[in-house]
Amino acid sequence: MRSHPLVTATQRRLAALARRLKRDRAGMAATEFALLLPLMVIMYFGVVELTQGFSASRKLTYLGRDLADLAAQATSLTNSGGGNNDVNTIFGAASGVFYPFSGAKMTLTGIVFTTGSDGKVHAYTDWSVATNSGTLRPCGELPRTSTAGNSPPAVPDGLFVAGATVVAADVSYNYTPILGSAFMSIGSNGTKLGTGTVTSIPMQHTSYMQPRSVTRVPYTGSTGSCPNVTFP
């Protein structure tokens, strides 16, 4: 039985079209790109967030070091309501290294080490001042710690030398991811994706410096001094 010429021609055209479609790869790249684009965007912004976060952490470390260093260079510190205010000058000068971030909480504390009646060396707060709602170290004896890292008000073991003093700078900052509301929430249960909650990441650093020119940096101010501090 002979096929109708029109049917045969149509079949040949359809077969040729099918072969061309099978060989055609022009649309595959576009399809793959469309599938990968959301992942690429998330990865890009993730890198941006990580870079910003590391930058904030690094600059906070610089802030703590500079703050302690500037205070340790002083021969005395004043904290009055007038123009003679060394403490505010130091806070303002050190803040420059934290740019473009701002709002870090800063605390400066003078700490003295004396030998007690038990023959052991103890640490006491001499004075403590803060800005941007920084947490003051309490007056009285400060706890001792052998744990590595920053854990104010505890003082590291290695600093306990009778007759020594240090200036401590405690700095902290809550870093809020630029796109935190879109991607993540960090809490006690770990990282949760897609919660739509803006979450800040707490950062903290403490630096200790010994006074450069004097044995003990004296402090004068209407607030911040601790009474009954005995120092040789």
Image (cartoon, rainbow, N blue to C red):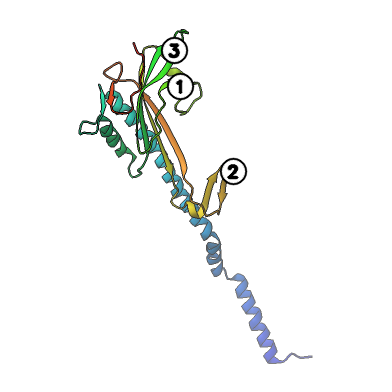
Q: Amino acid at mark 3?
A: Val
**Residue drawn 54% across the image and 69% down it:** 26
Q: Amino acid at mark 2?
A: Asn
Relative to 76, does residue 67 appear above or below in the rendering?
below
Marks 1 and 3, the one that precedes in the sequence: 3
Q: Using a 10 Å C-alpha cutoff, classify the residue at mark 3 as few (fewer than 14 neighbours), some (14 to 19) or many (20 or more).
A: some
Mark 1, residue position: 156
- Nearer the observer, 21 or 69: 69
Mark 2, residue position: 189
Disc 1, SS: strand
Marks 2 and 1, the one that precedes in the sequence: 1
From the top left corner, tell me how far across and down residue 192 is, in percent: 57, 49
Q: Is residue 189 left or right of residue 73?
A: right
Relative to 23, does residue 191 appear above or below in the rendering?
above
Relative to 13, does residue 86 appear above or below in the rendering?
above
From the top left corner, tell me how far across and down residue 187 is, in percent: 55, 44
Mark 3, residue position: 121
**Residue drawn 43% across the image and 35% down it:** 204
